Image (cartoon, rainbow, N blue to C red):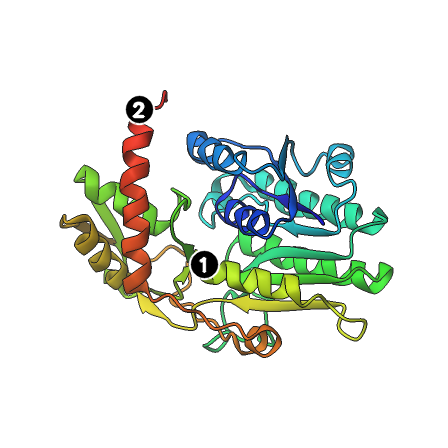
Amino acid sequence: MRVLVTGAAGFIGFHVSQALLGRGIEVVGVDDCNAYYDVRLKQARLAELAKHKGFSFHRLDIADHPALLKAADGAEVVVHVAAQAGVRYSLEQPFAYAASNMTGHLSVLEVARHSRSVKHLIYASSSSVYGTGSPLPYAESARADQPSSLYAATKRADELMSHSYTHLFGLKQTGLRFFTVYGPWGRPDMAYFGFAEAIMAGKPVTLYDQGRLKRDFTYVDDILAGILGVFDHPPTESAPHRVFNIGNNRSEYVTDLVRLLEESLGKKAVTIDLPKPEADPVETWADVSALAALTGYAPQTRLEEGIPRFVAWYLGWREQRARLPA
């Protein structure tokens, strides 16, 4: 079996590729390896994947449709997790989000539409689609028409484009709304990673609204369990396009995250307080009952377990990074 993984050099794409390779599945990875964050980390992930005989890689922009179509040849499943990430960065570089998240998603849809082999497209959405006005915990049936950032708007647009392609062409698809993913090999632009960097450097950690914001922090292994669950339970004719939350089903204070990082790093954080940015929600919390009903999904990793695991990896990566050319 051959699976195309977009964003294979990224955080989630790397872990998905590893998990599929561990099952003996051939993985074709694609990624443009852009410089949104440290490219050395993306290269290190790819070096790990290259240790597997079943892995091949194409450096390309998913919006380059002819190149993507060629790379996807023979794939039975597409796991599309490539995107321009980051809520706040979308305020600075909006066109990057339109190109990657919307034109790129359309390119993937066209690959699946015209392929003779693709049977299932699994694609990444985001908890940010719930925006403002939805009751907690977020259920998939809640309104998702008030995005508070351009990033959120692009991810909701992806869901709507996917719905139309299923309606028009019968594509079997699963959309996954990820909630604040963290863990080893994570993204440096995420709060937990940035906080660890700041604490180790003795620089201030910025908290918003005195740390009263809450997030559904989801360990990457639990995210993987959800992805593999829908991989193993593809859509049926009666429900050809589904959208599921993948979260930890817990809402926890950002101050708890900082405390656990302090304990694991053995250093105290210097904190400063600022007002919450407009693009940031006050709280996120996933209702995962729909995914649980289909796959038996049950998140296993509490923040108290996941942060020490991340820190153990982070300290090793920090040493490795110091030996690499900038």
Q: Is residue 193 left or right of residue 179?
A: left
What residue is shown with label 1?
A: 221
| Quadrant housing residue 163 | bottom right
At 51% from the left and 54% from the top, the residue drawn is 149
Mark 2, other Cα within 10 Å: few <14 / some 14–19 / many ≥20:
few
Residue matched to label 2: 323
**Amino acid type shown at disc 2:** Arg
The vertical placement of 154 against 303, above or below, is above
Determine whether 219 is above or below 69 in the image: below
Instruction: Look at the numbered disc 2 and give the secondary structure of its residue.
Output: loop
Q: Position of residue 25 (x, y in %)?
A: 64, 48
Locate the C terminus and report the quarter of the image it occupies.
Answer: top left
- Residue that protrudes farthest toward the top in the picture: 325
- Residue 84 x, y percent position in the rendering: 55, 43
Q: In the displayed structure, would residue 126 be above or below residue 323?
A: below
The answer to whether any part of residue 129 appears in the image is no
Q: In the rendered picture of this protein, how many numbered marks are placed on residues?
A: 2
Residue 21 vs residue 191, the one in the foreground: 21
Q: Residue 11: x, y in percent?
A: 48, 46
For label 1, the crowd category at 10 Å Cα-Cα, with few meaning under 14, some 14 to 19 and many 20 or more, is many
Question: Residue drawn at (62%, 59%), measured in percent from left and top?
Answer: 156
Of the numbered discs 2 and 1, the one sitting upstream in the chain is 1
Helix, strand or loop at disc 1?
helix
CA distance for labels 2 and 1: 28 Å
Horizontal side of 57 relative to 164 (left or right) equals: left
Three-letter code, disc 1: Asp
Could you tell me if the residues under marks 2 and 1 are in contact, i.e. CB atoms within 8 Å? no
Name the residue at 26% across, 50% down: 206
The reply to whether residue 22 is visible in this rendering is yes
Q: Is residue 90 left or right of residue 67?
A: left
Task: Using the image, tell me which numbered label, if any, was put on residue 27.
Answer: none
The percent position of residue 231, horizontal first and vertical second, equals 64, 61
